Amino acid sequence: MADSQTLRVNGTEAVVNSPSDTPLLYVLADELQLLGPRFGCGLAQCGSCSVLVDGVEVRSCITPVSAVSGKNITTLEGLPALYAEAKGLAQVPELTPLQQAMIDEQAIQCGYCYNGMLIKASELLAANSAPTEIEIRTAMNGHLCRCGTYPKIIAAIQKAASVMGANA
Ligand code: FES
Ligand code: FES
């Protein structure tokens, strides 16, 4: 049976009607047409479905939609606005420094892991503005890239931290 509930996604409230045990990932994609989070394993193993819930990375493939009602959900689409809010910027940039660094470092090949890498790295940089390589590796450990671009992803996170530090 469908349950109506209100979600707060990327700063906007949305009423959704999926059953309360529906994975958040399906609600985001099917009801709200947010295609940043992706279905990979469906078992909380790869990270491609990740979103931020109150600033903390959550695997949306195993999270029932009822568990996040009333919380602030940020998807890939909402990262620039979240960054602007955190930095007190007057305008929302098209891309965050992290997204730009991913492009500059050519860190993404097929792009399947891109969502989860950005979500997790955004969480990391919000908590630690100058992470060491070991801290980056530890934070990103649960995110799988089938194309094996890990060194470039780490370089992009380091570059983003540097740019954000210079702009602080
Ligand atoms: S699809 Fe959710 S962790 Fe892989
Ligand atoms: S770039 Fe293809 S899975 Fe990471």
Image: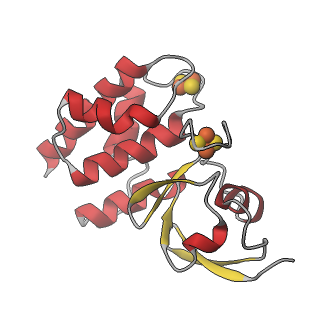
Quadrant of image for the N terminus: bottom right
Ligand 2 image-quadrant field: top right
Residue 123 to residue 144: above or below: below
- Residue that lies at the very extreme toward the right in this rendered image: 1
Closer to the camera, 49 or 31? 49
Where residue 37 appears, x then y in whole percent? 60, 48
Closer to the camera, 70 or 87? 70
Residue beneath the point at 65% across and 65% down: 64
Q: Quadrant of residue 62?
A: bottom right
Where residue 106 appears, x then y in whole percent? 43, 21
| Apparent side of residue 49 relative to residue 127 in the rendered image (left or right) | right
Closer to the camera, 38 or 1? 1
| Apparent side of residue 39 relative to residue 57 in the rendered image (left or right) | right
Residue beneath the point at 55% across and 17% down: 147
Residue beneath the point at 39% across and 32% down: 141
Q: Quadrant of residue 82?
A: bottom left
Where residue 16 appears, x then y in whole percent? 72, 75
Where residue 153 appears, x then y in whole percent? 38, 26
Q: Quadrant of residue 31?
A: bottom right
Q: How many labels, in total?
A: 0
